[in-house]
Amino acid sequence: MDLTELNGIATAMVASGKGILAADESSGTIKKRFDAIGVESTEENRRDYREMLFRSKEAMSQYISGVILYDETIWQDAKDGTPLVRLIEQSGAIPGIKVDEGTQALPMCPGETVTAGLDKLAERLKKYYERGARFAKWRAVIDIGSGIPSMTAISVNAHALARYAALCQAAQIVPIVEPEVLMDGDHDIDRCYEVTQRVLNKTFQELRVQRVALEGMVLKPNMAISGKKCARQASVEEVAEKTIRLLKACVPAAVPGIAFLSGGQSDEEATAHLNAMHKLGPLPWGLTFSYGRALQAAPQKAWSGKAENVAAGQRAFSHRARMNGLASKGEWQSSLEKKAA
Ligand code: 5MM
């Protein structure tokens, strides 16, 4: 393992003013997104949509540091035969790959899951590296509800995240470690804080036990935020203040960067929260976005599967990428949120 190189890649992924595009929707998830805009989820449509994003010059060259791909996408070629992964490289962004294989029911723990995908991971990483991937992503999912999460779910998911991260570093690939505490329930922000703290502490304990070099990874956490169905929705300032307090307590300064998931927040909320956190600096790590829905909802709607809408889709993507790029420096203002034409 060349830790200097891993650290350089991780640092570039969280460079100020830039963030990561999570375009790694699995087949089931992208179908849901396409259903919402009335587009059939064929291999060609998925390719055309992602090609539109990766050819968005302004967004990709100025505001996107890296792109997380799904297995299908990393092997796909653009219409003109150029591998999609080369389009990303040519834009100056770093290609990455989602390597988990989704969640499975966790035995003895009703309602909880563990993320699968460790089998043959070393071989898969080798092939992804040869294709151009320089970082990877694995997402563990922790749900908050009555009597959950159990310590069992937190523990097995942290163990799997650390196993994955160690395998990545051995393959000279930067692991994005994503332990997502869902914001789906009616819990308040303090319950989210408390659960996320347990999850992050256990995850870093496992990372240390399995000898993962913290300097060569990126953390992708949820924010400390109210559940979607909670009657009291915390303000932007409260989310920012509690998230920074939580991360400072749990994430060692050796970690080069933190890139948030959006988790179902609206586009503007996700931007406003990141921006507000940067008002609370200085921070010990790079702090940016790795959004899926909060970057793609607008371009998906603008594109709607029509070739004549490609330019509009790219404008919508560039707008959101720019807004989040500014937020990653604490320079965003809500007045900049005029609709992309
Ligand atoms: C883009 O969505 C990713 C893939 O999800 P599935 O494996 O469930 O299809 C997801 O892991 C994503 O990278 C993160 O959750 C962040 O995306 P959001 O939409 O929460 O910002």
Image: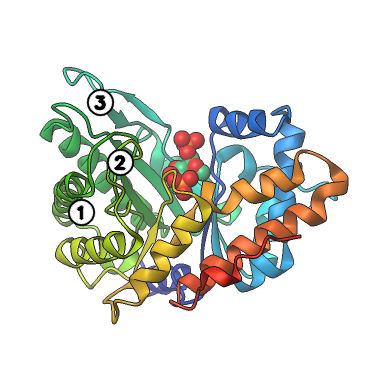
- Look at discs 2 and 3 and give the one toward the viewer: 2
Q: Identity of the amino acid at label 1?
A: Leu
The residue indicated by pointer 2 is 227
Q: CA distance from mark 1 to mark 3?
A: 22 Å
- Look at discs 2 and 1 and give the one toward the viewer: 2
Along the polypeptide, which appears first: circle 2 or circle 3? 3
223 sits left or right of 264 in the view = left
The residue indicated by pointer 3 is 112
Q: Residue at x 81, y 56 (%)?
A: 311
Question: Which residue reaches farthest bottom?
Answer: 282
Question: Which residue reaches farthest front?
Answer: 231
**Please, is residue 124 above or below residue 21 in the view?**
above
Q: Identity of the amino acid at label 3?
A: Glu
The residue indicated by pointer 1 is 207
Percent coordinates x, y for residue 147 in the rendering: 13, 27
Q: Nearer the viewer, residue 237 or 318?
A: 237
Q: CA distance from mark 2 to mark 1?
A: 28 Å
Q: Residues within 10 Å of mark 1 (few under 14, many from 20)?
A: many
Residue 312 got which mark? none
Q: Identity of the amino acid at label 2?
A: Gly
Disc 1 + disc 3, Cβ < 8 Å: no
* Residue 266 in view of the camera: yes
Q: Secondary structure at mark 1?
A: helix
Percent coordinates x, y for residue 158 in the rendering: 21, 43
Along the polypeptide, which appears first: circle 2 or circle 1? 1
Q: Residues within 10 Å of mark 2 (few under 14, many from 20)?
A: many
Task: Give the quarter of the image for residue 279.
Answer: bottom left
